[in-house]
Image: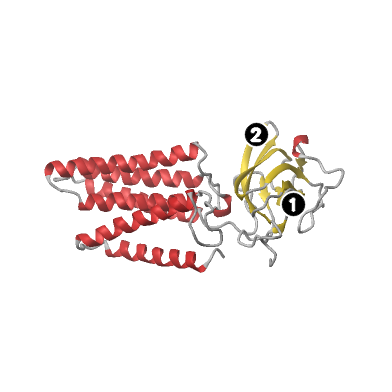
Amino acid sequence: EEGWIFAGFFLVIGTIQVIAAVLLLRPWPAIWFWFGILGSAAVIAIWVVSRTFGLPFGAEPGQAEAFGTPDAAASLYEAITVVVLALWLSDRSAVGGRIGDVAAVLVAASLGVAWVAARAAGLFDPDPRATIALPQLADRAVVALVAGVTLMLGLLAAFPGSRPGWWPALMRGMLAAVVVASGALVGLTLPAARGQNTACTYAPLAEVGQTNHGEVVPARLEAGEERWFGALLLSACGAEAVRLDSAQALNSRGAAEVLAYALLPAGERLPEGGAVELPADSPTLDLQPVLESGEQRELVVHLRGSDERFNLDSLRIGYRVGEESSSVAFAAVLGTCPPSDCAGE
């Protein structure tokens, strides 16, 4: 949907990476390792440009993309690839080899620290548009991956020559942990579709809308115009009532001003394209509305339009059950565009 140039890029790069990984299970000339190092570094550089300045082509040229868990994790993997392949090519003399091993351990550990720091600083959030489970589980998979790689590199540094009998078994165990963490991260970042947390797995709230997250049809919204739009269809899926305390945009793209949130009465739904006003008795989140067990109600958002497209990709909902408070994130399917930009849609 973004464009064939992007689809082709990911198809070609992904195929090359998988084939190269299999080929590197056997010895190859140094040029193949340089190919992996420079290729991975180039992909990382393209990602950085796309997230800072924006690529000069595509559907939205010059517009920076949002940081997300899947793309950040992919770049982390590519950075680890650079570290490991560079270590393979490093000077293997007694002194040079020890320096290279220690440097690889420090760089790998630094990548893990950078991930944790970026998450703590809010540089990016686990994106519910691209997760089939609790979004924060992706962080744990990343930490496990980095820890496994760092420990493996540490073992190589600690035992550069003769190795004790337990060494191979421990290395295989670390490799298995890295493979499991990698597979878990792939699984955790598969796109969510048609309802989220409907089995009430990690929160007493479920999003039960029937729209795939790749099917966002933008509604027309003039610059400066204010309108209410449906964002989530929530259900209290636990055995107790759920009180909603807050709502905030987690991931969004483009420019529009979020003015307020509201929860419609049971059975009320906004029409497609939004509404200028809400029913007079619609409570707002400031009044802490309550969803009874099994009840479904639509969470709506009041937007003021701008002269560019806007997507509200995910929301974090603060809630309370009894005296216990928590929050949960859900993917949203809300998009707007100025009429001049979406005349043919």
Q: Could you say which disc has been placed on residue 229 in the image? A: 1
Q: Which residue is mark 2?
A: 325
**Rendered image quadrant of residue 194:** bottom right
Q: Residue at x 24, y 40 (%)?
A: 102
User: Can residue 20 be seen in the rendering of this structure?
Assistant: yes
User: Can residue 239 be seen in the rendering of this structure?
Assistant: no
Question: As rendered, which of 328 and 258 lies closer to the eye?
Answer: 258
Q: Residue at x 53, y 66 (%)?
A: 3
**Rendered image quadrant of residue 321:** top right
Q: Amino acid at mark 1?
A: Phe
Whether residue 306 sits left or right of residue 25 in the image: it is right
Whether residue 233 sits left or right of residue 40 in the image: it is right
Q: Amino acid at mark 2?
A: Ser
Label 1: few (<14), some or many (≥20) within 10 Å? many
| Image quarter in which the C terminus is found | bottom right
Q: Residue at x 68, y 50 (%)?
A: 306
Q: Could you say which disc has been placed on residue 175 in the image? A: none
User: How are the residues colored?
Assistant: secondary structure
Q: Position of residue 11 (x, y in %)?
A: 44, 67
Q: Earlier in the sequence, mark 1 or mark 2?
A: 1
